[in-house]
Image: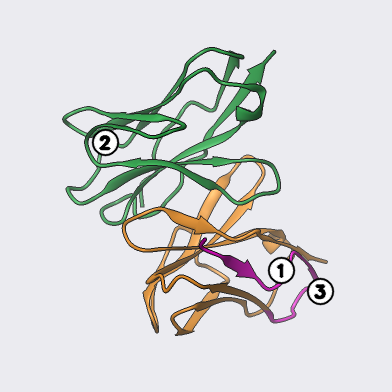
Amino acid sequence: DVKVTQSSRYLVKRTGEKVFLECVQDMDHENMFWYRQDPGLGLRLIYFSYDVKMKEKGDIPEGYSVSREKKERFSLILESASTNQTSMYLCASSLAPYEQYFGPGTRLTVT
Amino acid sequence: LAKTTQPISMDSYEGQEVNITCSHNNIATNDYITWYQQFPSQGPRFIIQGYKTKVTNEVASLFIPADRKSSTLSLPRVSLSDTAVYYCLVGPSGTYKYIFGTGTRLKVLA
């Protein structure tokens, strides 16, 4: 069974803090993704990575950066958290072009 | 980047067949069409994937016409537990590139 784990289920941070969201997959998948999900807006792609150290911008990359130093780990970084980044963050991995496996999500609140 | 288009919501009764259509006019030659199901407070879960014609698995069928500009997810004999949001996703290349649409909220009524 593919397992995608995210470092926290719930996170509360203050405005201006640097925030790291970590995602780890155990199936040697080449692709990894970060999405955010907000009510009424569905899932929106922030960044994805198709190989170590490779990344591509998704639909809403502004205010975010990513890091993929090892194949199994994909980090999402909020350089200076803002209240409009309060959201559910979902990580996924896949063996391109096949199904994505999603983690349980991190609900981030920025106050 | 483009988004796929689906109906926002649908209602159905238990035991009925439900068909949800997704429009993806600009699909690229090497794109696949994948459908996901999502329950509240959970990540999406894979249902079915196809490239062309018809694909069937134990939970659903996927119909893709020859021009591949749309696709239809068919859920046979739905139950209350099928109440969820359903997303189609087109990728990995072209203008859709892993961009989810807003999904279809299916409500199954007793």
Q: Where is residue A50 in the image (x, y as percent from the top left)?
A: 36, 71
Q: Residues within 10 Å of mark 2 (few under 14, many from 20)?
A: some
What is the number of the mark on residue B25? Answer: 2
Above or below residue B20? Residue B89 is: below
Q: Do the residues labelled 3 and 2 touch (CB within 8 Å)?
A: no
Q: Where is residue A86 in the image (x, y as percent from the top left)?
A: 72, 60
Q: Which residue is under mark 1?
A: A82
The residue stretch that appears in magenta: A1-19
Kindly identify the amino acid type of the residue bearing the numbered disc 2. Asn
Q: How far apart are marks 3 and 1 (CA)?
A: 8 Å
Q: Which residue is under mark 3?
A: A14
Q: Do the residues labelled 3 and 1 touch (CB within 8 Å)?
A: no
Q: How far apart are marks 1 and 2 (CA)?
A: 36 Å
Q: Where is residue B10 in the image (x, y as percent from the top left)?
A: 56, 20
The quadrant of the rendering that contains the C terminus of chain A is bottom right
Instruction: Select label 1 or label 2 by which is in front.
Output: 2
What is the number of the mark on residue B47? Answer: none
Dot 3: element:
loop
Q: Chain A is drawn in which colour?
A: orange
Q: Chain B is drawn in which colour?
A: green
